Image: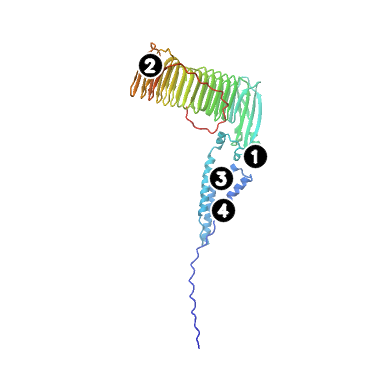
Amino acid sequence: MVSATQIPPAPPLPPRPPQPPQQSRSFAGPIVLIVLGIFFLLGNLGMIAWHDLGRWFAHYWPVLLILWGVIKLIEYQSANRAGGRARGIGAGGILLVIFLVAAGLIATQANRMNWQEVRDQMHIEGDIAPWWGHTYTYTDDLQQSFPAAASLQVVNERGAVNVSESNDNQIHITAHKRVNADRQEEAEKWNKSTRPRISANGSVVLVDANTWGAGDHWISSDLDISVPRKASLVVSTRRGDISVMGRDGSAELTNRHGDISVTDLSGNLALSLDHSSARVSGIGSDVSIQGRANDVSLEDIKGGVRLDGDFMESVKFARIAKSVSFKSSRTELDFVKLDGYLNLDSGDLEASSVTGPLRLRTRSKDVMINGSTSDVHLQNENGAVEVHINKLGNLDVSNAKGDIRIFLPEKSAFQVDAQASDGQIETDFSDLKVENGDNRATARGSVGGGGPHMLLKNEHGTIEIRRGVAIPPSPPMPNMPKIPKMPSIPHPTEN
């Protein structure tokens, strides 16, 4: 009899290791994205203006980080109570935080910029840059009687001013207005609040373009004004050109970031410029210009001319009847009269038919004086000097790192004291005693029995004393086109 075999029981299974608490998904990123999406949706639907949305984000973007942190803190405490572990930020969350911080800092700095100034400088209209709104145009017409002995004062914060002669004893104003707004209803409201104003205070009639009437909103108003010819003018603009034509009185014009054109003015003209250009012709009295200018052109001035400031691009004179005084950080120039022309830019100074005494102190320019009379006192460095003399007076020329060339009439009487360091001296006048050494050259003596004294000194350059006449002058100043609207202003070397 076979006995049954007893099977031993299976060993018990080892206990399972405890499972780590399951991580719950974080809602911080999605909630922040939902908030951003809601605001962008409102912007697309036109319920919030885009510039308002950008301004809110620039001010309040840290709230998104605070919201994110609050959500993560709530998730952490909830996970602890449930015995679980809160989910970390993760790579995607870190990238989103970096993006928020970078975008927020950029938006904050952009919000602090004066975008009105940028738009004015670049002449950007709303239809070109739609995030600034749309441009709506309006026209206002005003007129009233103008007192016989009154003067006119015009103030325009943003826009051009054109002043011409009226055919009656009234002042006529046409305002061509541009209003930037998101909707036409807003533009209509701001148009009504920016109607030009005329007021009288004693013998002064004040015209105010009233562009500030809309507060911070962008308004530009070009004023066409006709007024009796005898009225004197005081005009001030910050962003816009000024044009004055046909006046018997004087004019004081102040302009910033614009162009000035003045023609046919019998009285004195005073210009105050700030990054502006000026073209002036046909002035019956004195002209004074001060400030920081770009291009300046003056011709047919029956009085004197005085310029004081920094002139960044070019200065052109033609036919100035009385004395000229020019002063900038690099150049000081004075003379009695200009029958020809004078062109000055950052690297050259050229003049013809100058009546002296002429005094010039400059640097880093090539100087050409063609046809001077009377005394000449000239100091330069880092540039050549060439002087053609019609009528000889005392001549004092000092230069460094550039040659000196003097041309004198064929039959001249003068005496010379010249010396050149590290340079040679050459002359067409055999009466002069010239000694050229290795490091120093001198020339002394009298020609034609003596006369006006010539003192010439040069360092690191040659000196030439030649027989010759004035060279033919180049054309003075061609008919220049109207100065175009200014682009963003470069920063060239000052004159």
Label 4 sits on residue: 30
Which class describes the residues within 10 Å of circle 2: few (<14), some (14-19), or many (20+)? many
* Residue in front for this viewpoint, 122 or 307: 122
Label 1 sits on residue: 183
Label 2 sits on residue: 416
Q: What is the x, y in percent for residue 178? A: 62, 33
Task: Give me the C-alpha separation between circle 2 and circle 1.
Answer: 79 Å
Q: Earlier in the sequence, mark 3 or mark 4?
A: 4
Q: Is 199 placed left or right of 83 in the picture? A: right
Three-letter amino acid code of the residue under disc 1: Arg
Q: Is 464 placed left or right of 204 in the picture? A: left
The structure residue drawn at horizontal position 50% and vertical position 26%, both measured from the top left corner, is 314
Three-letter amino acid code of the residue under disc 4: Pro
The structure residue drawn at horizontal position 59% and vertical position 38%, both measured from the top left corner, is 129
Image quadrant in which you'd find residue 195: top right
Task: Give me the C-alpha separation between circle 1 and circle 3.
Answer: 22 Å
Q: What is the x, y in percent for residue 126? A: 61, 37
Label 3 sits on residue: 57
